[in-house]
Every structure is written in C-alpha cells, then in structure tokens.
Amino acid sequence: MKKTVICGATGLVGGALAKRLHEDGHDLVLVGRDPNKLRETFNFGPECLTWDELLASDPQEIDVIINLAGASVGDKRWTTAYKQVMRESRIGTTARCVEMCQKNPRIRLINASAVSAYGFYYDDPFDFAESDVDKRTGTSFLQELIDDWEAEALKAEEYGSKVTLLRIGVVLDRFGGAMPIMMRPYRFYFGGPIGAGKQIMSWIGLRDLINGICFLIERSDVVGPVNLVSPGACTQKEFAAALGKSLRKPSAVTLPAPMARAIMGQFGQELVLTGQRVKPQVLLQNGFEFQDTEINAFLQGLFAESNR
C-alpha cells in the first residue's frame, strides 16, 4: 500500500483522483490551506494536513507526492497582482514538495504542468510531442510560468528523486472545470466558435486524465514530461459544433476575437483565441489506452443522460 500525498485535492482533478486512489487502496494524505475543509469534503478518513504540517511530518513514510496545487487561471482577471498569485501558488508549493524530496530522495514527485509549455498559435502549425518544446515560437505569460514551474519541480532530481511532469490539456467533464462556462452561451442560443475557430484544442476527458495519472503512479520508469491529452485534438470550430450537437442547441454565433479579448482579457488571448496541437506520445508508447479519442462521440456520451 503506497502512502500517497495529494496537494490540491479540492479541485476537479484532485478531488476525482483522491476518490479513485482511496478506492485503489492508497494510504492518502491530503494537503491544503484548510484541513477541516478537506475532512468535510472527503468523508473516507484520509489524513489531512496544512503545508507546514506536511513539512514537519516524517518524509521517510511517503512514497509519492502528486502536486496539483495552483490558483485557477480562469476564476479572475489577470491583473498584475493575480498573475503573481498564480506564480506563487504553483512555484511556491512545488518548492515545498521538492523540500520533502530532499529529505527523502525515494519519494516520487508527480507534478502538474500544462500544454501551455508548447506556446500558443492561432492555427495548426504542427503537433507537439514531449520532446518538441524547442519547436515553439513566441512567448507568453503562461508559457514562461510553465517553464519556471517545471524547472522548480525538476530540482528534485538533483537529490535523486524521480520526477514526472503532467502536461495537462483542457480537462472536459460535465460538472466541473471549464465545461459549465463553455456551455453557458449555448443555453441561451448564442453558442458557437470563438475567433477564427482554427485554433487547436488539445483536450482530455476527466476519466482518461485520472486513469492516466494512476497509470503513471504505477510506472516509476516513466519520468520527465508526459502529455495528458486525448489523441483526438480538434479545432475550436469543431468543438463548438460538437458541443452544440450534444446539447441540442445551435452553434452558429461566432464571438469575434476583439470582443473575446475585451471580455476575457489576457486569459482569452492566451487560452481561448490560441491553442496548440499536442499528442500523448509517451503514454501511447508505454501502452496506455485512451477511452475518449473523438470529440463528437465524447460529448455525445457526456450529455446523453441529460438529453433523455
């Protein structure tokens, strides 16, 4: 039975992962700012600690740290102050995980990252495998943040720890993440593509994401960056059409790029009007099998129950 620490368990991914690992028999430690909230959320009795309590605990008892902590990129406008919050909430928490690895280099560190590592593009220049970061062009706030975030996590290798970087795409789930926001215009018959619609969305269904992380926990030989995305990346226009079809709503109203920038600011510029085609080369080469690989079929299945 592995003693597994999850940092950032209150988010969509962390919550689903904690429940799955509990079912799989892991001895779980959940870390966050409010242990009482963690205990209320997860009623199966995991150990719940503050960050300071984690650092004061015995690192020799820990097998794996999964760090998913970080302030949401979509909850607030990207002011200078909030961009600093996004940085500190990722790099600061990762530094604490590395500190635990320094005390016990047998700890495996699985640290969140994102496909923003590959840059941002208005169209579809080429696809990115894990080794293709050097192909990216341009720069952006998120890209620079990801570089610094991954560099902080990789410091654990200096102490002998194995480090896996989870480069996660757009996580799709009916009840959480970005989906409720994406669905909102369709409810009022204003759904459709954003901008030119040529930008690529590298997405992953929540169940494939959780299965992928569980797969990596058992595969300590898989280290370095791992793209957690479906093999079926699509354009924003294709996604809009598929979402409209699955919701039984029209998808013909385009939100012009200038309006998207005005509404969403830098977040819209970097994460909505641009994208990148990313392929899960490492997972596929190591035998991982995806359940959701085509956006139309995935969304139809996701909303099938509500359409009955």
Image: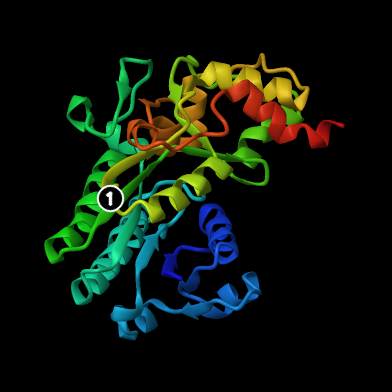
Of 272 and 169, which appears nearest the observer? 169
Which of the pair 239/99 is nearer the observer?
99
Q: Position of residue 242 (x, y in %)?
A: 64, 20
Q: Is residue 191 visible?
A: no
The amino acid beneath tag 1 is: Asp
Closer-to-camera residue (16/87): 16
For residue 156, above or below residue 284: below
**In which quadrant of the rendered image does the C terminus lie?**
top right
Q: Is residue 105 left or right of residue 86?
A: left
What residue lies at 55% left-to-right and 16% top-to-bottom? 237
Residue 57 percent across, percent down from the top left: 34, 84
Q: x, y percentage for residue 202?
A: 45, 29
Q: Which residue is mark 1?
A: 221
**Above/below status of 206 relative to 59:** above
Residue 155 appears in view? yes
Q: Tell me what residue is drawn at x 33 percent, y 36 percent.
A: 282
Residue 87 locus on image (x, y percent): 31, 55
